[in-house]
Each structure stands twice: as structure tokens, then as C-alpha cells.
Amino acid sequence: MLEHRIVKWLFALALLAGLVLLPHVLSFSQREIAVLLVINVLLVVSYRLMTLTGEWSLGHVVIMGVGAYASALFAKRLGVPVPLSMLLGAGLAGLVAGILSFPLFRMKGFYFLIGSFAAGEVIRLIWKFFSYPFGGPKGIKLIPPVPDLGSVAFYEPENYYYLCLVVVGISLFILYRIEHSRIGLTFHAIHWQDKLAESVGVDTFRYRMLAFVLASFFAGLAGALYAHYVGTVNPTRFDVEEMGFVLIWAIVGGTATFYGPILGVVVLTVINEIVLRSLGFDTARPMIYGAILIASVLFLPNGLESLVEKVKAAFSRPKQAKSAQQARESA
Amino acid sequence: MNGPILEVRDLTRAFGGIIAVNNLNFAVKEGSIHGLIGPNGAGKTTTFNVISGFYSPTRGQVIYQGQDVSGMKTAKLAEIGLIRTFQGTTLFKEFSVIDNVRVGCHRSSRASFFSRITGADRAIEAAATERSRELLDFFNMGHLADDPTSTLPHGHQRALGMAVALAADPRIILLDEPFTGMNPEETQRMMDLVRRVRKRGVTVMLVEHDMKAVMGLCDIITVMNFGSLLTEGTPSTVRNDRKVIEAYLGSAIDAA
């Protein structure tokens, strides 16, 4: 048991050191990718929280956009200081989700998927249609950046990377705690047997709404981090193609564990942006990327996380501990 | 025995032109085991679903502890102590056994959102786990607490369903066909469990097909036929009631 804990701590320390040192081994353009990757980690992990209740949304990236637009507008038009505007943007994304819950959670499963897509498109059309305040199809430009902290300038990808690391780190901690508390247990319960959950007093609508609002808050935060880094947002950035990427990250990584989607987004981004780019297949890159996706779904239907579970199981020798672990993971 | 804990007054439920329950009246005494029986299609399950909030009544009222609860949602009813179970093995099969019961402790384990994140809810959750273990022991399943639910034998799964319901602190528990698909030995054990549940001060109402179990268990039996009340009484009166026998077996004229 103790040995186990030491291994865990060593692994965590190594991971932390790796994350801190990472920008120093990357090129400038790779550092920019690293910033976006950290933001995308928050996006996909927040998405997973939503899927715990069994509902898969197609509006998550648009909700991220709500956070991005809101934070940008708060900062640019109302002069709200940037870190605060990010929180306000995230809050507004949560609020929008709360309002959307009323029509959307009248549906389940496939219908919810379509409903969330339609709701997202409505929001995107609102951005496109109203030049004031959303800037129409061109979106918002010259979004105020995060102000310098002493001599630390956040337009430097390296410094913004650390900022994102801290914000995303705290967010992931909160999301992890939520999942491993009774709230997470109730989400799972609603996923597997919503009628039974209701029969013991769970208000399933309220909990579905809670999952949606929380997921949207953190997606909005990811959007705000994005907006103040890139400096511009537009409706196309948050279209359904981007949503496709989130789904791919979640599916390839697997959604049974907390780290599955993180694994998905990191591995796929590294393969796509670093390995394939450096190998120089410029035009063939999307094709190879697609082939990797198909292969991973065919050969690893339970996601990359299932590989990790296998490795873990191989290391922990006692068979019974292993099956108990798996049972807990699947629960 | 005291006054009624649950009362159904002039209850009617129609689906389109079909009247599934027609002007039904009965009362469940506090502390009793009350059976609701009738041939297939008599409207038992519909009655059950109206009482437990799955359907709202077309006409009439459901009175629980003197309060009109007609059309109240299932979760709200659970909140005030009216808990139902389900036919078959409706459980969180993906959870461990104890986590099933922990979900059942939902009502007694309220805590603020922030205490969930900071871990300040630890005492509440420890109490819920403690309670879950106690309930599993009550059903002689304490040793199975950490097993995956899907591997439990049928009888244990049914008992677990009761444990989940009991975890929610019911004043009255509604059992939907608790004996279906059980062999005589399992039925015997289940009957024993139901009696022990009543001993905990919980009123029991059950819908059931297994006549032997119903007759052996219930204090009062309400018999329905074609959506209406046929008769009501103790097992021995119901058993010898001509109308009941006719409803189940057909009258001499029908048979001819």
C-alpha cells in the first residue's frame, strides 16, 4: 500500500516537473501549440463531466465561445479588468447553460444531442447576425490581453503557458473533486438508472442541469483563456467542426476515467501537430490523422485509457486487487 | 395499528379512451402490510404508478399523511418518505453493492456544493457509508459490500433493491412485484425480509401475483378487477370471496 503511494507521488512529481520544464524544450511555435493544448485539456475534461450524466452535447464548443465572447466584451467594451472578465465570462457561459437546460433537458439521448446542436447554432447565428456588440462574421478583434504581472509579460507563450497551467490545474482539481464526491456518484446514478435515482429522492432535472452548468462554466473559462491569448474570436472558431475535435479527443482517449480525455487530447495533438508536422507530410497530414483515428477506434474501442489500465494491472500482481480496481473504475 | 398513512380517493386514470383505473378507493393503515392484487390487466401497476408519481391521476386524489400528493413528482414524494421499488432487478449494476445503497442515502446526506469540493462533507459521507453497511448487514449482505452488483445472484439483487429503498428512510415503501421470478426458497426469504422491514416501523404496500406470498404476508388485501375495486379484507375473507374466485378463475357460466 505504502509502496503504491510512493510510486504515485513520484509519478505526480515527475509529471509536474515535466510540465514546468516543457516550454524550455519546445520551439516557439510548439510553445504556442502547448498553450492551446492546455486550454483544450480543460475543454475536454469539462466535457466529460457533462457526459457523466449520460448526455452528450454538441454545443460544448459554442458554450466555450460564449465564455470567450463574454470575457472579450466585458474587457473591451466595459473595461472590466481581464482576470475578472474571464470569471465573468465563465459565469455567463454557466448561466446560458442554466437557461438552455429548461428546453434541452426535456430531451434525452439522441434528441438531446440534436437539441444541443441546434441551440449552439442559434447562439452562433446571433454572433454572426449582430455586428453590435458581437462583430458579425468577423468577430471581435484586439481583445485586451492579460495585463503584465510585474516583469512577466503574458503575450509570451511561455508565460501564458504557465498561467494556463495554474488556472487549468485548479479547474481540474475542482472537477476531480466534484466527480469523486456524492455529486459525481449521483451523476453516474442518473446515467445508469434515472428512474431508480428519482425513486430515492434525486431530482434528476436539477442534477442534469448542475452537470451542464458546471461543464459550461469550465468550458467558458477555457474560452476566456483562449480569447485573451489569441486576441480575436469569431463565430467560425466555435463551429461544429471544432466540436468534432472535442468528441474525437474524448472518444479516442476514453471517458471511463478522469484522465482518459486528457490522454486523448494530448496524444492526438502531439501526433498531429508535432510528429506529423516534423515528418513533413504536409498535404497528407489530415489523411494520416484520420487513419490513426480509425485505427484507434477499431483496435482500442475502450480508448487509450484502457491501455493504461492494462499496464497498471500488469504491475500490480495480486489478481484480486486488479479486478476490484477495474470494478471501481467502471463504476 | 393507527389511522391511514396512504389513501386513494375516487382515483381514475385513463389513457385515451381506455380507463385503466376507475373510481378506486382504498386506505393503507400505518404499520400494516397491504397487498394490492388482481388478475392481469386489472390496473394494479397503473394504480401503483399513479401513487408513486409516474402518472398523474385523471380524476381523484392520492392522500399521504393527510396531504394531497396527487400528481407530485417521484423525487418529491421520496422527499416526504414515500419510496417505491421496481419490478425485477432495477439497480445501478455498474456500481459496487455499497455504492447502490449510498445513492439511496441521498436524502440524509445533503451537503453544500462547496463542502463537496473542499471535503468538508466527510463526516456526512462517513455516516452514509456506515448506514449503508448497517443496511447491508440487515439484509445479510454485509460481506458483499465491495462486490460488483452485476455479479450478485438474483435473490440478492432483489434484496439490494429493498436496501436501496430503505436507505432513503421511507415511512411507507411500495414494492412492485417483489416475488416475481423467485423460487419458493427465495420467496420464503423475501417474505421474511418484508416482515423485518415492517418491524423497522415502515408501512409496506405491495403489488404481487404470487398468491401464496400475498396471503401469507399481508394484513389487508385490496383486490382489483377491470380497473375497479372488487373487494377488500383480510387474507382469509378474500380467499373465500366468491367474486375474487370468479375474477381469477371465471364463473361457472364462463367456463361452460
Image (cartoon, helix red, strand yellow):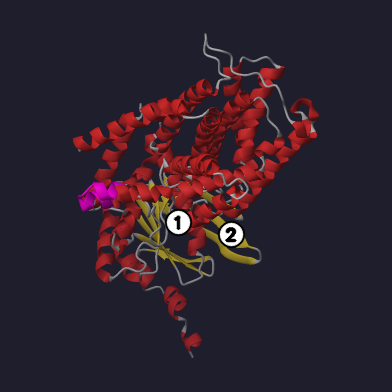
Q: Give me the disc on residue B19.
A: none
The crowd level at tag 1 (other Cα within 10 Å; few <14, some 14-19, many 20+) is some
The span shown in magenta is: A312-323
Q: Chain of mark 1?
A: A
Which residue extends farthest front? A280
Q: Where does the image place residue A26, in percent across and percent down from the top left?
A: 48, 30
Q: Is residue A108 left or right of residue A192?
A: right
Taking the spot 48% from the left edge, 49% from the top edge, the residue there is A252
Taking the spot 51% from the left edge, 29% from the top edge, the residue there is A27
Type of amino acid at the residue the image marks with label 1: Pro
Cα–Cα gap, marks 2 and 1: 47 Å
Tell me: residue A313, above or below residue B192: above
Labels 2 & 1 near each other (Cβ < 8 A) = no
Q: Which residue is mark 1?
A: A301
Q: Which residue is mark 2?
A: B13
Which residue extends farthest top? A150
Dominant SS in magenta: helix
Type of amino acid at the residue the image marks with label 2: Arg
The crowd level at tag 2 (other Cα within 10 Å; few <14, some 14-19, many 20+) is many
Q: Are marks 2 and 1 on the same chain?
A: no
Which residue extends farthest bottom? B256
Would you say residue A331 is visible in this rendering? no
Give residue A183's quadrant in the image. Answer: top left
Count of numbered badges drawn on the protein: 2
Q: Is residue A321 left or right of residue A134?
A: left
Tell me: residue A49, above or below residue B163: above
* Residue in front for this viewpoint, B69 or B180: B180
Give residue A201's quadrant in the image. Answer: top left
Give residue A222's quadrant in the image. Answer: top right
Q: Where does the image place residue B240, in percent across and percent down from the top left?
A: 37, 74
Label 2 SS: strand
Taking the spot 38% from the left edge, 51% from the top edge, the residue there is A306
